[in-house]
Amino acid sequence: MEPWRTAISTFEPNHIRIRGHAVEELMARGNFADTAFLLLRGRLPSPAESRVWNAILTASADHGPTPPSTMAARVIASGNRRAPEAAIAGGLLAIGDAHGGAGEEAMEMLRRGLTMMEEEGRAVGEAAQALLDSYRTAGRRIPGVGHRVHTNDPRTDALWTLSADARLAGKAVELMRSIAVALSKADRPLPVNVDGALAAVLVDMGFEPPIGRIAFILGRCAGIAAHVLEELTREKPMRIEVPFTYDGP
Amino acid sequence: MEPWRTAISTFEPNHIRIRGHAVEELMARGNFADTAFLLLRGRLPSPAESRVWNAILTASADHGPTPPSTMAARVIASGNRRAPEAAIAGGLLAIGDAHGGAGEEAMEMLRRGLTMMEEEGRAVGEAAQALLDSYRTAGRRIPGVGHRVHTNDPRTDALWTLSADARLAGKAVELMRSIAVALSKADRPLPVNVDGALAAVLVDMGFEPPIGRIAFILGRCAGIAAHVLEELTREKPMRIEVPFTYDGP
Amino acid sequence: MEPWRTAISTFEPNHIRIRGHAVEELMARGNFADTAFLLLRGRLPSPAESRVWNAILTASADHGPTPPSTMAARVIASGNRRAPEAAIAGGLLAIGDAHGGAGEEAMEMLRRGLTMMEEEGRAVGEAAQALLDSYRTAGRRIPGVGHRVHTNDPRTDALWTLSADARLAGKAVELMRSIAVALSKADRPLPVNVDGALAAVLVDMGFEPPIGRIAFILGRCAGIAAHVLEELTREKPMRIEVPFTYDGP
Amino acid sequence: MEPWRTAISTFEPNHIRIRGHAVEELMARGNFADTAFLLLRGRLPSPAESRVWNAILTASADHGPTPPSTMAARVIASGNRRAPEAAIAGGLLAIGDAHGGAGEEAMEMLRRGLTMMEEEGRAVGEAAQALLDSYRTAGRRIPGVGHRVHTNDPRTDALWTLSADARLAGKAVELMRSIAVALSKADRPLPVNVDGALAAVLVDMGFEPPIGRIAFILGRCAGIAAHVLEELTREKPMRIEVPFTYDGP
C-alpha cells in the first residue's frame, strides 16, 4: 500500500503537531474553535476571525429538537442505548441538501456573484438581480433567504454586527443583503436567514463553499450530543410513537 | 403523538434560547466551546473551566490519519464524493470501545475509586491498589494508562498543568496519577495517556462518564472534517488499495 | 501495511469466488439469501435450512413505519434527499439494544440454557426456570417474550411451523417455548415474540449469537430502503414536525 | 403531529401485512429477495423476475475486502467492537458516487437513450452514439463500462444469460451492449461491467434508477456483514495501521 499523505498533522514519540503547531501550545490558547479553524484552513485565525468563527459555530449549535438531524439522533438513541456515537453520527447524516445544505449552496451562489462583480465590473445590485434571474430560470429556490419561523433571525443580526465590528464583512455580505432586498416585496420583506448570513461571512473570510456545510456540522454536533444525552438520561427506551395511516393495498 | 420535552433549547419567532441564554449573547462571547459546555452541562463554564474544557477538546481534535475514525472517514470519502456528511458520520462510528472509549471507562473507574475514598475513608494509594486488583481479577486492561507511541504524552502534561493552574485538578487527578505509579515498574514507568488525563480532569470538573466519549467526539469531529476535506481536494476517487491474502476454501 | 487476510472471498481477472464458489454459480441458484447464508456461515444451506433462513429474513423485513430504525431513516431522508445511502445507514444505526437487540440476547440466553441441559443434565423445564431466576435476580427483562401489540405473533407461529416441517426445530425451540410457558400466568399467557422465535431457530440451526442481530439487519435493510424510497418520492422535504414542550430555564 | 402515511405495510394485533400480503405467507415462499422486490416494487415478482432479481443481489454481495464500503466497515469494527450495526452502517455510507453509484447513473443514461429510441425513432446504434457524444461533451466518464481487473466480468455474462433465458432482456440490454461496442477499439475491447449489466437488466425489468443503488446496497449489506463478523472474530482490536507521510508545515 502506498503511504497516505497528509498536510494536517503528524506525530513522533512525545510530540504531536497540527499544521506545524505543537498540540500543547494549541491547548493553552483556550479556544477550541481556533484549533478547528487551523485544521480546516491551515493557519490560526486572527483575533477578529476567531470571534466571528466562534459565533458561526455557536449560531449552528442548536435550536430545539425539531430539525431532522436532532430528531433522527433522538429516535436512534431511543432504540440504541449502548452506542451514543451511533445516535450522534445518525443525526449528522440528516445534514444533507434540504437540511443544512443551504449554507454551502449560498456560498457557491455568492462566489458566482462576486466573480460577476470582479470580472465583469457589475454593481452589487446588478449581480444580485442576475443571480435571482438565473435561479428563477432554473426553477430553484434562492438559498439563504426566508424562514418558516423567524422574520428577523437573531443569529443573522448578530453575525452582521460581529462581522462588521471585526471589519470582516465585505462584498459577499453586501451582495447577500442586496439579494434579500431584491426578493422582498413592499408588503412582505424577506430576511436573510442564518444560512445566508453565515455563508456571506464565510465567503468574506475567504473560506471555500464546503466549509458552509462543515461549520454547520461542527456546531450542530454539540447540540445533537446534548439531545442524545438528554434522551438517554430523561426518557425511556422506545418511547417514541409516530401515528400513521396506511393507504396501500 | 405526545409532545417531546426538552430542557435544552426553545424558540419563538425571532428568539432562540439555549439553556435560557439568548443565542446572540452566546455568539458574542467568542468561545464556541463554552456553548458546547452550556448545552451539555446546563450552565456556562467559569473562566477557569472554559480554559480547561477548551484544552480537552483541542487535545481530542487530531493526531494524524491513522486512528480508525480518521481512516474510516477518508476511506468513505474516497467512495462517496458528494456527501461529506456521510464520511464525517462514518468516522464518528469508529469511536466505540477499543478506539475512543477509554476516557468514558476511566471516568467510571475513577468515580468508583473516589467513592471508596469518600465512603470508606480509604487513602488515595489504597483506592488505586483496590482498582488495580479488581481489574486484574476481571482480566481487564486498566483504562487511561500506557501508549503505543508516547512515553510522555504531551497532551497529558498540558492537561495536568492547565488544570492545576485553573485550580480544577482534584482527587480524581491525584487518583489517576497514583494508579499510573502503582502500575509502573522500576525499569518501565507507565504514563497516564490522554484518555486517562482528560478522564481525571473531567471527573474533577464534575462531569458524568458519558462526557468522556462526547468530548472526544466533539473534538475529533473537527479533525475528521479536515481529513475528509483533504481527501476530497487532494486525492483521486477510489485511490485506496489494501493488500490482502485469501485463506479460505 | 500488513496484507489483510480474509476467508470470505477473492478475485483474479475474470473470476470472483465467494467461500470457494464461483459467483456466477451462486447467481444461477435464484436465491440471494443462500448467498448471505454462505457469506456468514461459510457453506451453502441445505434446502431445509434455506427455507427457514429465508423466512427469518422476511420476518425481519418490515412491520410499518413506527420502529426507531424506520422512523430515523425517514427523518434523515426528509433532510437529506441526495444521499439515500445516508438514510438507510442511519436507520440501521437504531438497531441497537432496545430495538433489534433481543434476538442476539435471547440466543445467548438459550445457549446458556442448552449448556445447563447438556453438561448438567437438567431437564428443559429446569433450565427454563434457572434462566428466569437468573434474570429476575439481575433485575433484567427476559428477551424474546411478550409484545406490545401482538398476543400471538404471526411470525412466531410461522417460524414454529416452518422449522418443524424442516426438521430444524430442536432443543432451543423447546427451551424458548418452555420459558414462555413458565412466564405466563393463568389469566395472561405471554407469547414468544418474533425475536425469541428467530433466536431459538437460529440456535437450533447452529448459528452464533451475533447472527441474531445480523439477520435482523439484513432483513430490515429491505424494509428501510422501501420506506426511504417512499419518503423521497411521496413526501416533501422537511415535512416532519414534532410537537415539543420546553421545561428548561 | 400529522399522521405519517405509508402504502408499504401495516399491522393490527396478530396481523402484519406487507403491500397487502400477510407476512406469514411471504415467509412460506422461501425467497427473501421476493419480499424485498415486493417492498420496493409494490407487487411480487414473476418466477422469471425472481430469478434475475436474486442474481442481481448476489452479483452485488461481495468481491473481496478492498472496496471502500467493505474496507470502511472493517476499519470501524476494529475500533468499535461492541456495536456491529455501526460498522455495517459505516460501510453502506461509502456507497456514494465513485463507489456503487455507477448502476444508478447508468440506469438514468439508458432511460435517456430509450426515450430517444421511442420518441425520436432512433436506432439503437444511433442512440448509443448520441449518449457517448453527450458524455464526451460534458467531459464525463460513461458509467457501466470498463473494469480495473476484469476484461470479461463473470457477473456480466451471468446476467446476460439469466435475463435472456428469463425473456427479460430487452432494449436497455441491447443499448448497453451497443454502447460498449461503440467504445471499444479494435485493439482493446471495453466490456460492460457489473454496474452496467445490472443497470440494463433493471431498466428492462421496469425499475426506476434509484433501485440501481438500492439493489447494490441490499446485496452488499450481506458481504459487509460477513466482513464485519470476520474482523470481530479473527482480528485484534485496532490492528489496522496505515503508513503515511506528512508534507505539511
Image (tube, coloured by chain):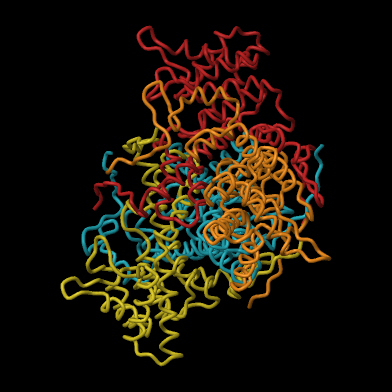
Chain colours: A cyan, B yellow, C orange, D red
Left or right, residue A150 beside residue A59: right
Vertically, is A163 above or below D99? below
Instruction: Decide which of D85, C178 is in the foreground and name it.
Output: C178
Left or right, residue D130 beside residue D115: left
Considering every residue shown, the one lying at the far bottom of the view is B121
Left or right, residue A206 beside residue C137: left
Left or right, residue D234 beside residue D34: left
Considering every residue shown, the one lying at the far left of the view is B187
Considering every residue shown, the one lying at the far right of the view is C187
Write the residue at 42% across / 86% down.
B116
Quadrant assignment for the C terminus of chain B: top left
Task: Look at the image and tell me whether residue D2 can be seen.
Answer: no
Vertically, is A73 above or below C159? below
Instruction: Decide which of C165, C15 is in the foreground and name it.
Output: C165
Vertically, is D249 above or below D44? below
Task: Look at the image and tell me whether residue B201 can be seen.
Answer: yes
Instruction: Decide which of A54, A231 is in the foreground and name it.
Output: A231
Q: Indicate the position of residue A78 as horizontal and vertical percent values.
A: 63, 61
Q: Indicate the position of residue C45 as horizontal and vertical percent values.
A: 56, 34
Vertically, is A123 above or below D205? below
Q: Indicate the position of residue D206 as horizontal and vertical percent values.
A: 67, 23
Q: Indicate the position of residue C47 as horizontal and vertical percent values.
A: 61, 31
Instruction: Determine which quarter of the picture holds residue B173.
Output: bottom left
Instruction: Decide which of C80, C111 is in the foreground and name it.
Output: C111
Write the residue at 71% across / 54% down.
C193
Instruction: Determine which quarter of the picture holds residue B172.
Output: bottom left
Quadrant assignment for the N terminus of chain B: bottom right
